[in-house]
Amino acid sequence: MSFTYPSIRTRLENGVLFATLDAGPLNLLGVDLVRDLVSLVDTLYSDPGDVRVVVLDSASPEYFSAHVDLTAVPEYTAEAAKAGGPGDGSLGMFLYKLARVPVITIAKVRGRARGGGDELALACDMIFAARENAVFGQFEAGTGSVPGAGGIQHLARRLGRTRAIEALVSADDFDADLAERYGWINRALPDAELDGFVERLAKRIAGFPPQGVRAAKRAVNDLTLPEPAAVRSDAMAFRDLVALPESRERLGHLADRGLQSPGDLERDLGEAVGQYPH
């Protein structure tokens, strides 16, 4: 059993694996980070050792994970494919596997979680976020595409039909308080209280007999997670739509203004996708 990765810092304490994403200032879901996440999840399935709970957070104060690396979609998809079997070569199917991992997973979010970064958080069992600075969003519709890694499936189930459509087609940002009110996340907490709250909860759960915790998670998953076919369909729709000329044009416009670089555009991406010149 090893939990050592180039782009994820880890610490194991009292049955809780604290896993901190550390893949640059934006924590883009690219080749390196996806490779390490796949390795982490594979270990949790095959040899979790004493791990009962995983807390996932970010080394970047501004970004939990900005989104996928849009310059390396085939490459990170190939890494994600290593987590599944034939026909499951997508980030969505890897995150579906993460959602069913036989330990409890908690996303602790500071900063921005958009696109694939939000979908990573949604694949966890719980999400707790800093009230002052956490931001959630699925911006894909603003570029002519759709979320392809579980965002549609999770938000429709959590938010209900009308709020899910609002979140998806507005392509806008949702602060932690609004995300909590909509059911996107479990709770928004003051930043100063977030670490202590999550650590206490994680260690409390880790101290319980694991059989009952796993059985409860399996039962809820069976009632609430989508069928794999729906996840595959979303992944195909994302790949097809993001390749369309209008999508490429809009992404190119955003790239010229600073997409995937630390700066104002990434900080205010929800606003930026609504400012395409007509």
Image (cartoon, helix red, strand yellow):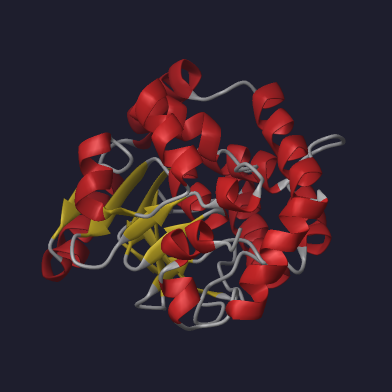
Q: Is 266 drawn above or below residue 154 in the view shown? A: below
Quadrant where the C terminus sits is: bottom right
Tell whether 85 sits left or right of 262.
right
Q: Which residue sits at x=48%, y=39%?
A: 168
The location of residue 73, given as percent across then percent down, is: 77, 59
Q: Which residue sits at x=55%, y=67%?
A: 3
Quadrant where the N terminus sits is: bottom right
The location of residue 63, given as percent across then percent down, is: 42, 71
Is residue 179 or residue 276 the one in the foreground? 276
Q: Is 181 drawn above or below residue 15 in the view shown? A: above
Tell whether 188 sits left or right of 54.
left
Seen as rendered, the residue at the extreme top is: 223
Is residue 73 or residue 6 the one in the foreground? 73
The location of residue 113, given as percent across then percent down, is: 43, 59
The location of residue 9, given as percent across then percent down, is: 48, 75
**Residue 214 in sight here:** no
Quadrant housing residue 14: bottom left
Q: Is 107 drawn above or below residue 99 in the view shown? A: below
Is residue 199 or residue 69 the one in the foreground? 69
Seen as rendered, the residue at the extreme right is: 86
Tell whether 159 sits left or right of 237.
left
Q: Which residue sits at x=59%, y=58%?
A: 40
Quadrant housing residue 17: bottom left
Q: Which residue sits at x=49%, y=57%?
A: 274
Quadrant housing residue 175: bottom left
**Residue 273 in sight here:** yes
